[in-house]
């Protein structure tokens, strides 16, 4: 018995139609997850107003057509901050996100590089990484001098698991 | 009856040796070694206390790491959602255009009209895609 025609696997349909011309064009951010994760707290700090505006708009109406304008602002702001990070802290940014890329995108495994990156961004752009909701009187986890979870504790684990650990 | 005034016969009775029997050694006779019970209990308590302390330290820090991770995602949500919305809007508009082209001969047909009786946005669940040429 042959399978009906509808079940034959077809290549996924990719709609080639461009965005309607009445929508102003905007570049997409075009960076992968590791640089985004590396820059996340600075995107959050730098684009706070645009982001909040967009999310409030989405809360008002979930229709994609409803918040296109706010969405463009969000994207432009993110592109702007990433460009600035590249301008001022290119080396630190790149080493940090490459480290994240190699290490399952976990911040605690790239703390020394992150510290350098954060310092550079604070010096040049006056943006600080703040984790909301840290308990009162407790050292924020990214500033701990003697953290419980360190790179080395994970290196041991990864070597146990047969993974290759360098750095 | 015979006379009872017979001479008493000397009898040897089973008696303890001179000076009595030696005492029986029923007690364990192992030399004492190792720490005392109290030391053991206190030592194990101390080791466990340190272990629990470190465990909760690690647990609390993992909690904070999780929060850090969560906030990094929260900061990225608007950016990713905006990009996704533009793409969804683009594809929806294209689908509506295709629908209008297909249904142009049906009078009173409104392309892109929601099938639900609500003003709320319902994401498109069934996409009509053009047939392969």
Image: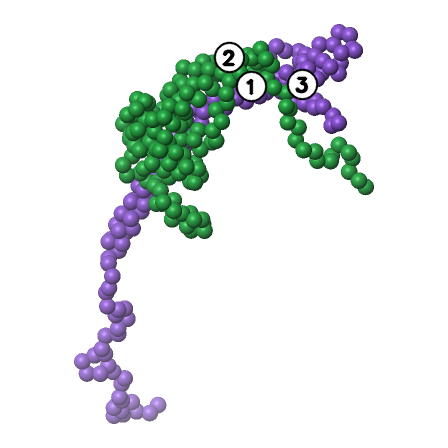
Chain colours: A green, B purple
- Looking at marks 1 and 3 on the same chain, the residue that comes earlier in the sequence is marked by 1
- From the viewer's side, name the closer residue of A88 and A53: A88
Residue at mark 1: B86
Marking on residue A69:
2
Q: Residues within 10 Å of mark 1 (few under 14, many from 20)?
A: many
Measured Cα–Cα span from mark 1 to mark 3: 14 Å
Q: Position of residue A9 (x, y in %)?
A: 70, 35
| Chain under numbered label 1 | B
Proximity of marks 3 and 2: CB atoms separated by less than 8 Å: no
- How many numbered callouts? 3
Disc 2 is attached to a residue of which chain?
Answer: A
Spot occupied by residue B77 in the image (x, y as percentages of width and height)? 47, 23
Element class at badge 3: helix
Q: Identify the residue at horizontal 27%, vertical 47% (top origin).
A: B46
Q: Is residue B65 visible?
A: no
Q: Secondary structure at mark 2?
A: helix
Q: Residue at x 55, y 19 (%)?
A: B85
Q: Residue at x 79, y 11 (%)?
A: B105
Dot 2 crowding, Cα within 10 Å, few <14, some 14–19, many 20+:
some
- Frontmost residue, B22 versus A158: A158
């Amino acid at each position: 018995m042959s399978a009906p025609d509808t079940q034959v696997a077809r290549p996924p349909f990719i709609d080639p139609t461009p965005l309607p011309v009445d929508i102003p064009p905007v570049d997409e951010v075009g960076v992968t997850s590791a640089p985004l994760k590396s820059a996340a707290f600075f995107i959050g700090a730098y684009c706070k107003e645009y982001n909040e505006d967009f999310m409030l708009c989405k809360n008002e109406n979930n229709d994609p057509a409803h918040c296109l304008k706010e969405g463009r602002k969000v994207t432009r702001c993110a592109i702007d901050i990433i460009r600035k990070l590249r301008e001022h802290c290119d080396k630190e940014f790149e080493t940090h996100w490459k480290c994240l890329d190699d290490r399952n995108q976990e911040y605690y495994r790239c703390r020394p590089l992150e510290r350098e990156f954060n310092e550079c961004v604070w010096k040049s752009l006056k943006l600080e990484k703040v984790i909301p909701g840290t308990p009162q009187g407790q050292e924020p986890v990214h500033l701990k001098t003697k953290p419980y979870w360190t790179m080395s504790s994970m290196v041991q684990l990864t070597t146990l698991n047969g993974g290759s650990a360098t750095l | 009856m015979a006379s009872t005034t017979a001479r008493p016969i000397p009898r040897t009775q089973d008696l303890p040796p001179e000076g009595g029997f030696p005492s029986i050694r029923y007690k364990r006779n192992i030399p004492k070694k190792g720490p005392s019970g109290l030391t053991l209990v206190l030592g194990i308590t101390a080791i466990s206390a340190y272990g629990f302390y470190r465990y909760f330290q690690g647990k609390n820090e993992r909690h904070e790491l999780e929060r850090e991770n969560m906030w990094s995602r929260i900061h990225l949500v608007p950016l990713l959602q905006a990009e996704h919305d533009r793409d969804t809007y683009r594809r929806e508009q294209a689908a509506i255009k295709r629908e209008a082209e297909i249904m142009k001969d049906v009078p009173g047909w409104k392309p892109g009209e929601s099938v639900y009786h609500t003003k709320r946005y319902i994401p498109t669940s069934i996409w009509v895609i053009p047939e392969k040429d």
